[in-house]
Image (cartoon, grey):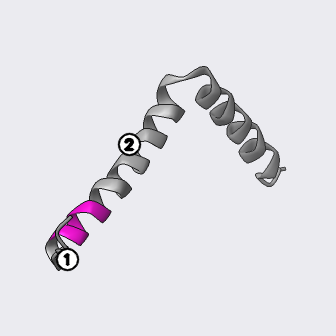
Amino acid sequence: MAKTRLTVLSKLLITLSILAGVFFGGRYLLNNTEFGQTIMEKTEEVKAANQPQED
């Protein structure tokens, strides 16, 4: 194999691609799966429990 180095731009593009994959994968997981819906419901319950009661 040839010993070539990646340029700064190619490293940046690879890093951004990985981050975008993680971001959109997590977004898909939360919005389009039963597992994600369960997490969202529990989050809403915790939010409601932590809000101060108004008299």
Residue 15 against residue 31 in the figure, above or below: below
Callout 1, which amino acid?
Arg
Badge 2 element = helix
Calculate the distance from the C-alpha at mark 1 to the C-alpha at mark 2: 29 Å
Residue 53 against residue 35 in the figure, above or below: below
* Residue in front for this viewpoint, 33 or 55: 33
Tell me the residue at 41%/49% (across/down): 23
Image: magenta residue range: 10-15
**Which residue position holds label 2?**
24
Tell me the residue at 23%/70% (across/down): 12
Tell me the residue at 43%/40% (across/down): 25
Badge 1 element = loop
Quadrant in the picture for residue 10: bottom left
Which class describes the residues within 10 Å of circle 2: few (<14), some (14-19), or many (20+)? few
Prevalent SS, magenta region: helix
Q: Is residue 54 visible?
A: no
Q: State the residue lying farthest toward the top.
A: 34
Locate residue 19 relative to residue 17 in the image: left or right.
Answer: right
**Which residue position holds label 1?**
5
Locate residue 21 relative to residue 31 in the image: left or right.
Answer: left
Q: Nearer the viewer, mark 1 or mark 2?
A: 1
Residue 5, position as x, y percentages in the image: 19, 76
